[in-house]
């Protein structure tokens, strides 16, 4: 089919209208439905056909490019693993043969069947006298279509069954020509592209699929990365503009009210940072534009006091405040500590309550029904000024008399849609304060939290004890025994211990499907493939083992994990808080916010199974009292990168430095994935740790601000609006609509 004959409407043209049946196949195999989808299906790499030669022209040890055909292929199981290996024989143009071997046949066995011609790229080896290529790259296709590749660079695509690379190249060529003939609109205005020396989007795609040289590939990548940055930044700028347009009630605390009295009885001086951030927040609350602020600060930096002051200001202004925690355990704990801090200031309407006192209520999903009904009624009738709760608070039928402020603790467990749902509980939009203890690097803040104002608490309150961390190589004789002795010593000194495991019970099959991204988008190779039979500690079996452990004889050891009921968890947590449990074996349910000052030692088993920020967060649970804390990171990994990563965590207590390190070692999908931030921002190509990409993000941020200031709804930029609509996932789209 000739492309000129097809009436195309743009990037979203259905593929089958341009390439016919091939389009249907691509839709089925890879979910590629539109012209844009196919163009976004980027090559992983390129093979330079200019360098191709015959087997006889190369030497052992050389990287070779070979044009050859598969003669034989077979798979066989490999010892000690579930994998199969693929062995094949290929033959070059003059009939010389080499052996091919893939130690994991997966994905290759269907691609490399006898008769298939391809260009292979890899290191030529000698194996038992035969020439061999071990897991080479290859691009499948007819070998006599060189005119298809303007720079003799053959793209290698993620594998699709029965569709060779050359067929994709043909389809891409047709699509590029069709879109060019139709004069498809570039989503980004020309003046911006010219200013940043970026190619047109269609040219960028052509450069990436059919490059003339590698310099062109670089320019193409830069353009797509810029677009990705712009999409995120425009969406954020739009959301920000919508916040700016919102109006709410300005709240000013009554003089000589609760806040003043609370300050007078505070047993410590606020740090300079706490004072500054508090002042900023009170100023925000006194405005008609709803506050939308992120407060980040190390574990123990005193965020809760800052939040409580804001909530008291709200109550003084005659409205209500809600504090949302990610778990019941945390909600309980916040509730208790707020009641304690407020004392008789929290006994409004009760005998012995102070003048102007308010009331604090706890609302969780597991509360008895009658109790819950009463709390709901109190919230509705304004009998309660401060409500502390879990998600239940928003999922159930809660009507506030006048909700003025929502504080969300630990952002990383809380999604946009949840905050948004709570916002809907108020007559006019409430002020929102989000607190997180996971330090967020600037680039992430710019990308993920670009719609919020950001405050930081960088100093810890005086007298805070440092947490010392050590790496424990479990494989070395005696080290683990010493670890348990150390726990026993801590308990003997009147303290308590946590033992953290990566899972609850028996090992599940957590094998994840491999994500197919172009190679150049992947900064970090996944490591750890060497360990084929991982046996990670589970809470249940560790509890049993530790109860048998001679060093821990006589200690009260209990467990806590997410599969226990809320009531069971609360009971264990209360007992641990009360000092009735010496050693608590648990999963990461204790990760966020749990505050038992008497717990001074934490043993993290299989520490390599946890992310850097998570380890930092976990160990923040010890050393909250005056005694200083000790974290022992146990691992039986001997992989250099893993040990190095853990050693860095052990050596650093600066959460911001660790957050940067964390970011370097992760892929953006992990950083920005829905389960991390609840925002579902999928960056495919941008790397937040790459300084050139950060530069692009900064450019895009400025451009987005200008675009949105001139044209908030992107009316004169429909192609950009469409690109954003396509990329911004449904969660966010829904959010934007509701504004
Ligand atoms: P975060 O929520 O940031 O982890 P918290 O607000 O829970 O930290 O504070 C940790 C502990 O430090 C609490 O026991 C709190 O009472 C105490 N604290 C907070 N601010 C100060 C301060 N300025 N001086 C001394 N102790 C403080
Ligand atoms: Mg906290």
Image (tube, grey):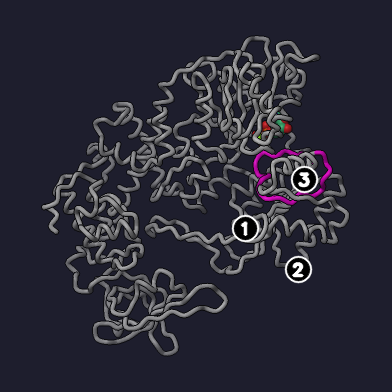
- Image quadrant of ligand 2? top right
Binning the other alpha carbons within 10 Å of mark 3 as few (below 14), some (14 to 19) or many (20 upward) gives many
Q: Can the viewer see residue 219 in this picture? A: no
Residue sitting nearer the eye, 613 or 566: 566
Question: Which of the two labelled residues, at mark 3 and mark 2, occupies the earlier sequence position?
Answer: 2
Q: Real-space Cα distance between discs 1 and 2? A: 19 Å
Q: Residue at x 35, y 62 (%)?
A: 158
Q: Say the numbered circle drawn on residue 477.
A: 2
Q: Which residue is mark 3?
A: 600
Range of magenta residues: 578-599
Query: Does residue 593 belong to the magenta stretch?
Result: yes
Q: Real-space Cα distance between discs 3 and 2? A: 25 Å
- Give residue 116's quadrant in the image: bottom left
Q: Secondary structure at mark 1?
A: helix
Q: Which residue is mark 1?
A: 608
The location of residue 292, given as percent across then percent down, is 50, 27
């Amino acid at each position: 089919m000739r492309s000129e004959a097809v009436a195309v409407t743009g990037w979203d043209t259905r593929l089958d209208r341009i390439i016919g049946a091939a389009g249907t196949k691509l839709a089925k195999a890879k979910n590629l439905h539109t012209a844009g989808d196919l163009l976004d299906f980027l090559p992983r790499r390129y093979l330079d056909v200019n360098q191709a030669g015959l087997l006889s022209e190369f030497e052992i040890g050389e990287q070779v490019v070979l044009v050859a055909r598969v003669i034989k292929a077979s798979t066989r199981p490999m010892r000690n693993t579930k994998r199969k290996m693929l062995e094949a024989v290929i033959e070059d143009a003059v009939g010389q043969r080499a052996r091919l071997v893939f130690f994991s046949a997966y994905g290759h066995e269907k691609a490399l069947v006898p008769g298939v011609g391809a260009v292979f790229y890899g290191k030529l080896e000698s194996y038992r006298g035969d020439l061999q290529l071990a897991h080479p790259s290859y691009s499948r296709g007819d070998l006599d279509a060189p005119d298809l590749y303007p720079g003799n660079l053959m793209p290698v695509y993620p594998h699709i069954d029965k569709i060779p690379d050359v067929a994709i190249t043909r389809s891409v060529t047709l699509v590029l020509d069709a879109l060019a003939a139709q004069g498809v609109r570039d989503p980004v205005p020309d003046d911006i592209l010219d200013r940043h020396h970026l190619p047109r989007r269609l040219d960028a795609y052509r450069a990436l699929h059919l490059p003339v040289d590698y310099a062109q590939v670089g320019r193409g990548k830069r353009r797509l990365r810029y677009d990705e940055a712009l999409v995120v930044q425009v969406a954020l700028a739009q959301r920000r503009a919508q916040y700016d347009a919102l109006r709410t009630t300005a709240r000013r605390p009554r003089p000589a009210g609760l806040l003043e009295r609370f300050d007078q009885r505070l047993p410590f001086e606020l740090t300079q940072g706490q004072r500054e951030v508090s002042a900023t927040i009170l100023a925000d609350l006194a405005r008609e534009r709803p506050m939308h602020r992120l407060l980040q600060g190390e574990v123990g930096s005193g965020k809760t006091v800052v939040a409580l002051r804001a909530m008291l200001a709200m109550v003084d202004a005659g409205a209500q405040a809600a504090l949302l925690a990610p778990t019941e355990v945390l909600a309980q704990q916040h509730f208790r500590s707020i009641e304690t801090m407020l004392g008789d200031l929290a006994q409004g309407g009760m005998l012995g309550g102070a003048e102007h006192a308010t009331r604090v209520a706890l609302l969780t999903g597991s509360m008895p029904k009658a109790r819950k009904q009463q709390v709901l009624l109190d919230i509705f009738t304004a009998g309660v000024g401060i409500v502390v709760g879990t998600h239940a608070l928003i999922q159930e039928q809660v009507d506030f008399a006048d909700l003025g402020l929502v504080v969300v603790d630990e952002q990383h467990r809380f999604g946009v849609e949840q905050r948004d749902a709570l916002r809907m509980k108020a007559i006019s939009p409430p002020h929102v304060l989000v607190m997180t203890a996971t330090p967020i690097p600037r680039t992430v803040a710019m990308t993920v939290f670009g719609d919020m104002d950001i405050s930081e608490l960088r100093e810890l309150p005086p007298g805070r004890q440092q947490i010392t961390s050590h790496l424990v190589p479990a494989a070395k004789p005696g080290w683990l025994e010493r670890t348990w002795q150390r726990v026993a010593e801590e308990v003997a000194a009147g303290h308590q211990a946590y033992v953290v495991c990566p899972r609850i019970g028996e090992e599940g099959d957590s094998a994840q499907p491999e994500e197919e991204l172009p190679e150049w988008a992947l900064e970090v190779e996944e490591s750890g493939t060497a360990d084929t039979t991982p046996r990670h500690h589970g809470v249940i079996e560790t509890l049993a083992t530790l109860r048998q452990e001679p060093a821990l004889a006589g200690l009260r050891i209990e467990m806590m994990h997410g599969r226990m009921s809320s009531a069971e968890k609360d009971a264990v947590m209360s007992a641990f808080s009360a000092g009735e449990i010496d050693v608590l074996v648990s999963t990461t349910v204790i990760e966020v916010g749990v505050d038992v000052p008497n717990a001074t030692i934490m043993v993290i088993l299989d520490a390599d199974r946890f992310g850097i920020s998570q380890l930092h967060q976990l160990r923040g649970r010890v050393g909250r009292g005056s005694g200083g804390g000790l974290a022992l990171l146990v691992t039986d990994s001997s992989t250099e990168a893993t040990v190095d990563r853990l050693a860095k965590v052990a050596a650093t207590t600066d959460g911001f430095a660790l957050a940067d390190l964390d970011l370097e070692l992760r892929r953006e999908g992990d950083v920005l994935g829905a389960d991390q931030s609840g925002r579902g921002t999928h960056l495919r190509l941008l790397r937040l740790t790459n300084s050139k990409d950060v530069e692009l993000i900064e450019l895009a941020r400025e451009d987005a601000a200008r675009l949105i200031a001139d044209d908030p709804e992107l009316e004169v930029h429909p192609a950009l609006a469409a690109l954003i609509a396509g990329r911004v996932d449904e969660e966010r789209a829904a959010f934007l609509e509701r504004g």
